[in-house]
Amino acid sequence: MSNQWWEVLIYGGGAGAATFAGMMLILAREAWSRRFSASLVSYSAGVLLGVGFLHVLPEAMELNDSAPGFILLAFILFYFLEHHLLIHAGHEEQHHVQLEDDCHDGCCSRPHPLGTVAFIGMALHSAIDGMIIGTGFEASHELGLLAALGVIAHEVPEGIAMLSILLHYGWPRRKAIQLTSFVALATPAAALLSYAVVRDLDPQWLGALLAMAGGSFVYIAASDLIPESHRSRGLTASLALVAGIITAVAAGLVTHGH
């Protein structure tokens, strides 16, 4: 196995581990994770915006002149995915509030079917994240690292959201953990698969995939994470957003320096 294969596996696994970390925050310290969720979401949004605008999208436009059209296509696809499946990676507290009218003591008498819809949507989203990592490494080592950074940045809130949604929809704790673990493992699996499929891909197609990947980064930040960060009016969330952008800039300098 080549070094690049190992990198895809390691960084794809790192993204999956971040989802596990989000799950463990809910299991171990729910009150603490909710207390700092606004700063975490803001930081994640900053990383995604920085990586998307400064690194992924410029690379895509170099490879494919029609990249702006594919960026728009990514926005449309993610809009329909979220609008019709009601999945928002950073909105676990919103689900918690909505369910208080339907459930007592945070647990329904039987699992609500929307928990299944949430699981399908999250699993699909994690698979797309894996494809972003695999496609990035096919383009270049540096872009693969940056893509992995962008994905890892929002996997923690995804892990928080997935477990919270399932628990609050009345799913048994053990089953909720199993399904969240599946969502986490979908990322490294899809990263390896997409890396194998896109090898020796025509630059035009590679540019199109990267454009959709970058578009999805910007969409997630603008549609899900930034609105969630607005729930905190303090200066901390704003500084966290800036810190995320600086992280993306710094990561680009470090990776290109190598």
Image (cartoon, rainbow, N blue to C red):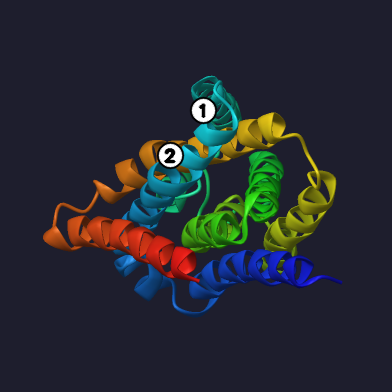
Q: Position of residue 219 (x, y in %)?
A: 45, 36
Q: Is residue 167 left or right of residue 186?
A: left
Q: Is residue 198 above or below residue 70?
A: below
Give the residue type at disc 1.
Ile
Q: CA distance from mark 2 to mark 1?
A: 9 Å
Q: Is residue 116 left or right of residue 47?
A: right
Residue at the image position 38 percent from the left and 59 percent from the top:
248
| Residue labelled with disc 1 | 71
Secondary structure of the residue carrying numbered label 2? helix
Q: Position of residue 26 (x, y in %)?
A: 50, 70
Residue at the image position 50 percent from the left and 48 percent from the top:
89
Secondary structure of the residue carrying numbered label 1? helix
Q: Is residue 76 above or below residue 141?
A: above
- Do residues under tags 2 and 1 come within 8 Å of each other at their CB atoms? yes
Quadrant containing the N terminus is: bottom right
Please tell me in which quadrant of the rendered image residue 65 appears.
Answer: top right
**Tag shown at residue 218:** 2
